[in-house]
Amino acid sequence: MLGSEAWPHEAPPPPLAGFSFSPLSSQWAHRDPVVDLSLLLAATNPDLVRLPIYWETVEPSPDRLDFSSVDALLEAVVLHNERASNQTRVVLTIGARNFLYPELHEPAWAGPRQQPHLNQMQSGRAYRSYIDSSILRYRGSPLLYAWQVENEPFDYVVNDLTGDDQIQPAQLAWEIDEVHRLDPGRQAMTTTFDGWNVAIDTFQLFAEPLESWLGVPLSGHPADALAAGDVLGLDLYVDGPSVPLRFTSPALRSEWKAQAIEFWAAQAAAQKKQLWLAEVQAAPWGTALHGFTPADLIASAAGYRRQPVQVVLMWGADTWLQDPAWLSAGAQAMAILRAQ
């Protein structure tokens, strides 16, 4: 249950590496999101950047769509590519569940932020216009690499703004089908997190009654997310208040994550699908003095480089602009991941 020994093996082809960026982080800090994204692009020159299409932002009323905030971020990527040797592309995230707090980005006009009302709203004309219009607007962009459909849709996110916020399987299936129908040929990823180590993932996959017997959730929903989309995106955090067994070191917990990556990569390959690391911790959690460090990020990147994944996206890049040590570590981690 707590083991970490694994034989090293030859590194697979390098993944595409990049980071996630939400304009909300800049807005909360009273900064310009376009300026912040431009600075991060210039400093790291990523292969990919993940950007949100927030329902609450682009559909401010049920009869109006406004994509100007998304267009501005894409224009920043275009301008970066005009002077960069490495061309950056984007993963666009659609759905009521989208990345960054409070996870459920539902507009105020949509009513109660919980099920079953959420599912009723997602089945309505306004929400479906948001989904279809997003796909149709950006499917022709040469920047677009793939779609992410919902964020951790099967996982219950506990916060003070939402109730039961899990996305219904039928609704997620409709959204993924819309990506396939309106933008055939592009992949649809959806995300979740794994257990604290590969033993928990194995129990969940092959001995599901164990969770019911223990009475506590031991993992996210990687098997369900893998079955739902073309790509399984794993969210990997090794330090934070919700991370179990924090008496262990970040290095050991990163090794557990590397073993889980190998396990789920094999499951994905068996279904002829890909495994991406959708959120790799690349910033400390809050102000903890003895938590995740820049050195831990670099070490974890070296471990993940030896795993068979196609994309690695770092989480926390919005904090790098305030700390040169983290900005340098993020750039180094990307270089390690992309090394031949």
Image: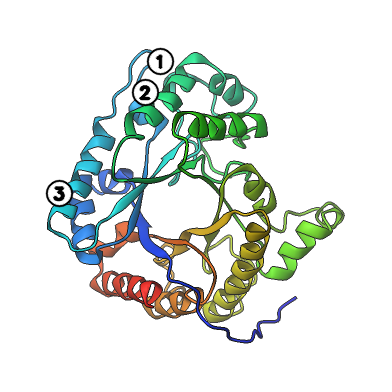
Who comes first in sequence, dot 1 or dot 3? 1
Instruction: Give residue 93's position: percent from left, percent from top.
Output: 43, 41
Residue identified by numbered label 3: 79
Q: For residue 43, what is the image quadrant?
A: bottom left
Q: Please rate how many residues cluster around mark 1, counting C-alpha atoms within 10 Å: few if below 14, some from 14 to 19, many from 20.
A: some
Instruction: Give residue 262's position: percent from left, percent from top.
Output: 62, 70
Q: Relative to 231, does residue 250 appear above or below in the rendering?
A: below
Task: Evaluate if marks 1 and 2 touch, with contact meaning CB atoms under 8 Å apart.
Answer: yes
Q: Please rate how many residues cluster around mark 2, counting C-alpha atoms within 10 Å: few if below 14, some from 14 to 19, many from 20.
A: many
Tag nearer the camera, 2 or 3: 3
Foreground residue, 126 or 84?
84
User: In the rendered picture of this protein, how many numbered marks are placed on residues?
Assistant: 3
Q: CA distance from mark 1 to mark 3?
A: 32 Å
Q: CA distance from mark 1 to mark 2?
A: 6 Å
What amino acid is found at the position of numbered circle 2 in the picture?
A: Glu
Residue identified by numbered label 1: 62
Q: Please rate how many residues cluster around mark 3, counting C-alpha atoms within 10 Å: few if below 14, some from 14 to 19, many from 20.
A: few
What amino acid is found at the position of numbered circle 3 in the picture?
A: Leu
Could you tell me which residue is drawn at 73 percent across and 54 percent down?
217
Task: Evaluate if marks 2 and 3 touch, with contact meaning CB atoms under 8 Å apart.
Answer: no
Task: Indicate the secondary structure of the residue bearing disc 1.
Answer: loop
